[in-house]
């Protein structure tokens, strides 16, 4: 089973960055990468979805990265991205996501799709 919190093999190299890349979902554009963490088993994107809203997305949600076109394509919908933990403080959001949602994410990965957490905003 792929690690939900690691970039898929071959998507980023040692010196690659996806900051500023457009983020495409299965149903269209959702925003752009504000920044990312690249540590294996602790990797995620902070996606700016507009209106000063940022969401934490596990790196395992990535389908492809096109460095030439500066595009990250995800395996999920825009609504699913907006259902991930909001980013106020990435470290807190990441820690909470790991603690509270890892079971849901992992079950979704095993079943062939993601099960995103419900977040009451």
Image: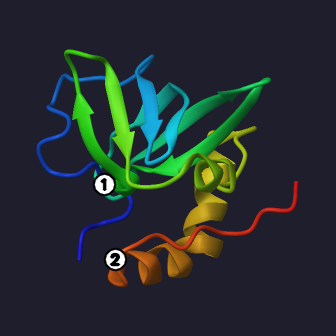
How far from the left and from the top, in percent, is residue 119?
78, 62
Q: Looking at the image, which residue sits at the far right?
A: 121
Q: Where, quadrant-wise, is the N terminus in this rendering?
A: bottom left
**Label at residue 6:** 1
Asked whether the beta carbons under mark 2 and mark 1 sit within 8 Å of each other, the answer is no
- Residue at image coords 25%, 41%: 64
- Residue at image coords 66%, 51%: 93
Residue 106: image quadrant is bottom left
Please rate how many residues cluster around mark 2, counting C-alpha atoms within 10 Å: few if below 14, some from 14 to 19, many from 20.
few
- Residue at image coords 60%, 56%: 80
Task: Identify the colour scheme used.
Answer: rainbow
* Element under disc 1: loop
- Which marked residue is nearer to the observer: mark 2 or mark 1? 2
Chain-order first, disc 2 or disc 1: 1
How far from the left and from the top, in percent, is residue 104?
55, 79
How far from the left and from the top, in percent, is residue 49?
65, 31
The reply, left or right, for residue 40 in relation to residue 56 is left
Q: How many numbered marks does the figure carry?
A: 2
Is residue 61 positioned above or below 45 on the image?
below
Disc 2 versus disc 1: distance between alpha carbons?
Answer: 17 Å
**Label at residue 118:** none
Please rate how many residues cluster around mark 1, counting C-alpha atoms within 10 Å: few if below 14, some from 14 to 19, many from 20.
many
* Element under disc 2: loop
Residue 96: image quadrant is bottom right
How far from the left and from the top, in percent, is residue 39?
32, 45
Q: Which residue is mark 2?
A: 112
The reply, left or right, for residue 41 in relation to residue 80 is left
- Residue at image coords 40%, 21%: 21
Is residue 66 positioned above or below 27 on the image?
above
């Amino acid at each position: 089973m792929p690690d939900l919190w690691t970039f898929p093999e071959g998507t980023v190299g040692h010196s690659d960055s996806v900051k500023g890349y457009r983020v495409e979902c299965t149903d269209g554009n959702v925003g752009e990468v504000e920044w990312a963490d690249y540590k294996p088993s602790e990797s995620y994107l902070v996606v700016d979805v507009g209106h000063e809203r940022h969401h934490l997305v596990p790196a395992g949600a990535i389908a492809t990265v096109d460095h030439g076109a500066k595009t990250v394509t995800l395996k999920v919908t825009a609504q699913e991205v907006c259902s991930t933990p909001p980013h106020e403080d990435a470290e807190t959001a990441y820690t909470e996501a790991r603690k509270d949602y890892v079971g849901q994410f992992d079950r979704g990965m095993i079943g062939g799709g993601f099960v995103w957490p419900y977040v009451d905003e």
